[in-house]
Amino acid sequence: MNIRNEIVGINTEVPCLDGQNRKYVFLDNAASTPAFKCVLKCVEDFAPWYSAVHRGTGFKSLLATELFDSSHEIAGEFVGADLSTNTVIFVKNTTEAVNKLSARFNFSSGDIVVTTSMEHHSNDLPWRKYAKVIHVGTTEDGHLDLPNLKDVLKQFGKRIKLVAINGASNISGFINPYHEIAEWTHAVGAKIFLDAAQLAPHREINILPDGDKRHIDFIAYSAHKMYAPFGVGVLIGPKTFFETGAPDVVGGGTVDIVTLDEV
């Protein structure tokens, strides 16, 4: 397959300051990719069949619901998630996924989140809202300082509730040994979150079975960095974690029954 021929808008010309039109060359696919023609075709093919998801019993509604639900399964299977114990949540993008996860974590005073100085700020600022954040440094060439990470885990131990790292840097492209880090994290009783926004488009990911010491507890990635820029992000984690507590968004599908006195 000629990938270049699959890109929507690859030959689009744009006006330049000298008054001429030239073919547009986009150099920041790490930020967001264009769509593939096959992806756009899927959207166009489905559009005539779209109807209310989870809200109707007509043929189109049932079909749309089936496709909506199966798309969650596909997104989970894409990273090897056990869907009997893990749930797939669709959000706008990875940034919203991190914010949702941080809001649901129910941190206590003194809890620590360990992240790194090589993170996108979306995997830093949401944690600062709810917990003490410790940043692990990098080496001179930009790799994660793994001895420093080990020292932090040893020093703070059980106070650490989460280690939040990227799978690959959006600046250097360096890939972190996230399964190895997961094993170190679990050894101190903490969970691990993997920001896979930059990793998922380029490498196969397997979060491994739940009982594996190297299992990734939470993972997020975005379609708009994977040639499907139509507003979908993915957050995956244990069902039991997300079932705890009240919904952070109320109304709509979260409701069984509402009266003036009771919800």
Image (cartoon, rainbow, N blue to C red):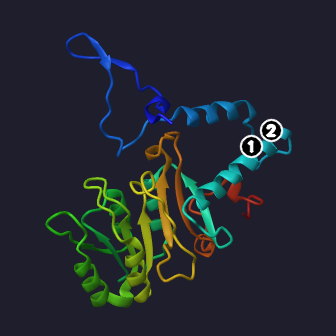
The quadrant of the rendering that contains the C terminus is bottom right
Q: 252 above or below 20?
A: below
Q: Which SS class for mark 1?
A: helix
Residue 143, quarter of the rendered image:
bottom left
Q: Can you identify the residue that label 2 sits on?
A: 60
Q: 60 above or below 137?
A: above
Residue at mark 2 to residue at mark 1: CA–CA distance: 6 Å
Q: 49 above or below 212?
A: above
- In the rendered image, the residue lying farthest to the front is 1
Q: Can you identify the residue that label 1 sits on?
A: 64
Residue type beneath disc 2:
Lys
Residue at horizontal 39%, vertical 89%?
Answer: 158
- In the rendered image, the residue lying farthest to the top is 19
Residue at horizontal 86%, vertical 40%?
Answer: 58
Residues at circles 2 and 1 in contact by the CB criterion of under 8 Å: yes
The percent coordinates of residue 207 (x first, y second) are 51, 69
